[in-house]
Image (cartoon, coloured by chain):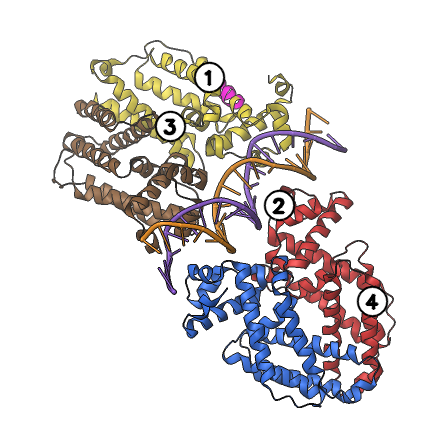
Chain colours: A red, B blue, C brown, D yellow, E orange, F purple
Amino acid sequence: MNEKFYSLKKEKQDRMINGAMQIFAQYGYRHSSTDEMVRVSGVSKGLWFHYFENKPGLYSFITSYGLKYAMLELSMRSVRQGTDYFELRYEVEECKMRMLDKYPYLPLFLGSVMREEDEDVEELIREPRQKYAEQLSSLMMQADYGALRAKEDYLLLIDMVDYTIEALLTDAYRSRSFSPERYLMEVRKHLDAMKKLL
Amino acid sequence: MNEKFYSLKKEKQDRMINGAMQIFAQYGYRHSSTDEMVRVSGVSKGLWFHYFENKPGLYSFITSYGLKYAMLELSMRSVRQGTDYFELRYEVEECKMRMLDKYPYLPLFLGSVMREEDEDVEELIREPRQKYAEQLSSLMMQADYGALRAKEDYLLLIDMVDYTIEALLTDAYRSRSFSPERYLMEVRKHLDAMKKLL
Amino acid sequence: MNEKFYSLKKEKQDRMINGAMQIFAQYGYRHSSTDEMVRVSGVSKGLWFHYFENKPGLYSFITSYGLKYAMLELSMRSVRQGTDYFELRYEVEECKMRMLDKYPYLPLFLGSVMREEDEDVEELIREPRQKYAEQLSSLMMQADYGALRAKEDYLLLIDMVDYTIEALLTDAYRSRSFSPERYLMEVRKHLDAMKKLL
Amino acid sequence: MNEKFYSLKKEKQDRMINGAMQIFAQYGYRHSSTDEMVRVSGVSKGLWFHYFENKPGLYSFITSYGLKYAMLELSMRSVRQGTDYFELRYEVEECKMRMLDKYPYLPLFLGSVMREEDEDVEELIREPRQKYAEQLSSLMMQADYGALRAKEDYLLLIDMVDYTIEALLTDAYRSRSFSPERYLMEVRKHLDAMKKLL
DNA sequence: AATGAATGAGCTTTCATTCAT
DNA sequence: GATGAATGAAAGCTCATTCAT
């Protein structure tokens, strides 16, 4: 289906991928307009449809591509069984920051994809979305939950950590200039705060 | 500016307010369409513009109205100085649930307003948004932070609580039928989980 | 579905119907553009979709309307059982010419509808198209086929008459100014030519 | 103008000619899309414009080529002065069927060209179109009109024959599989039907 | 010569907004 | 006040045409 796209020069591929990710990440599927992608990527309108048939097709491709890239990045970290939960959680965020070089909006996009509910695309992204979620949770399952596990409600605490990190990421992108260092520091601080409670 | 609107029958006012809140809360400013408000409210299209000039004007009014209503509701609870932080935080959520009778989408709308970033309206809602935030934080400042305060990072923990509660609310509205009881129970569980850590 | 349209002023209804008929008759379904209908009718683009949802909906409505009008016109002639075949066939064409006052492109449109093959609309127009064909043939069955019937191949001769009349109509519209009188005269001449052979 | 094209391998020439004829014959000038010709011919898009500059240029070439081929085929039949009109008319159709080997859509294309009215190309095809019409009519003038000529309106009868044959051809192509034998039989039957009247 | 990537005008459709009634 | 008909800019998508390779 998308072999044509892959035979483009890598630089242009990435310009398109980044343009689409940025707009989709910021506005969600329905709200994202081709014209804005044209503007931020410098790639003409016709070409988007030349490669991706239609808007759902584009979204589905970018989603699948982005999630695969994220999964690859995740799988590339050497999995040390029994890493401390908070440490591992932090490493996952570090991992996201490593994506920034090639795909500056990918971390934000990942979150927006996981929350996407538009019925025109929900079906199309179900599978890659689920796989990504599974890889993440199976990665986290290898953590040493240490003192956490002692608590009967440790799942709730993990929820809180996840919600918090997601919110921090969104906030970080909201500011004019996204700084991965500042973001990671915020994550670290919040993780530490909870860790100290245990 | 909107005196005209207030001379409408209260019932119709509320039908319009609820219609706008529902759509804005679900889709955000930009994605909300007049036609959908017409549909859910049963109030003709012309009337919306008769009373509110344009879409930013409508959003600004509804925001300001909704935030004021929420502030009133908040201020109506008898402030017992020194209530335990977690208890107070819970009461704030209870308070939101009390709004459901008149404005079923107000709690969701509050969150969406606080996150709204569309540049067409950001300016217009800045002030009421800030006032609401201030009232909330000044209310929370009256709490007894107990063991929490002992922690040097207690502000971070509070962040986590806030992010968590906001996410729980969004999740609660995502399900077909929003149940205030179920929501409050979730909030309670998460608050307790953290409280126990202290 | 189209009650809204019928509550328009009759004059505007007819302006829209005529605009659509003209463009559809000349270019066929697929080729007809809203912009051209806007131009010939002076009715804004948005309004077409306000009343007719989409292009197939518009085509289906105009088709159904035009065929019904034609059937009404046909049924209004006093049916004299046993009229000479050639006379009756001529009267059918006279009947079409009577439509010109209100719908100048209807006779041409009828032919184009009967030949339309676009798969987006074929289903939608099947029924009215069939009904019209049936009324026409049941009308013609009341004719006195006289000497014609004696011929074993009289059905083939009728084919020829039909093909000829259809071609004459198309030719007549091709000229800059369509003249019903000239057209009817042509029809008469050709009918007579064949009649004399019998 | 098109010498370049003629230096292509004959097989590729014919693939292009057939592709263009098929699409133009089926959809008319305006509705024919380059992409469809690319698809049915397997010849790349750029090449079409390399050889034919633009769409009118292509249409003009294919028209001129197709008409010339038809004229050649017509002129190749040994003209027996005084052949019976109906026989000659039938032979003309046989002649068209002989084109099918090389250009399966040429007979249909001929008819569509003669009816083409798009103003972008009308001028361009006027001359070849007229020449073809003239050759056809001068060929037919050599016929023995026999009993036909006795009729004062024999020209009208000839019209009817022509219209009928054209309609039969269009009908024949409409069916999934075009059968020259079946088509010729239909022509024969209709010609005979009229002949018997004389 | 040959390919197909690239472009932008134009088409169908949506939607905030205006206006006659 | 109240309605919904009316408008046109903008969105998703198609297609003739150009151009780098």
Q: Secondary structure at mark 4?
A: helix
Quarter occupied by residue D127: top left
Say yes or no: labels 4 and 3 on the same chain. no
Q: Identify residue type, mark 2.
A: Phe
Q: Nearer the viewer, mark 2 or mark 3?
A: 2
Quarter occupied by residue D179: top left
Q: Identify residue type, mark 4.
A: Leu
Q: Nearer the viewer, mark 3 or mark 1?
A: 1
| Disc ID at residue D128 | 1
Q: Would residue B50 be found to the left or right of residue E7 on screen?
A: left
User: D48 or C49: which is nearer to us?
Assistant: C49
Part of the protein shown in magenta: D61-70
Q: Position of residue D136 (x, y in %)?
A: 39, 16
| Disc ID at residue D184 | 3
Residue under pointer 4: A184
The chain to which mark 1 is attached is D
Q: Position of residue D66 (x, y in %)?
A: 49, 21
Is disc 2 surrounded by few (<14), some (14 to 19) or many (20+) residues within 10 Å?
some
Give the number of callouts: 4
Q: Main secondary structure of the magenta part?
A: helix
Q: Would residue D175 be found to the left or right of residue A142 on screen?
A: left
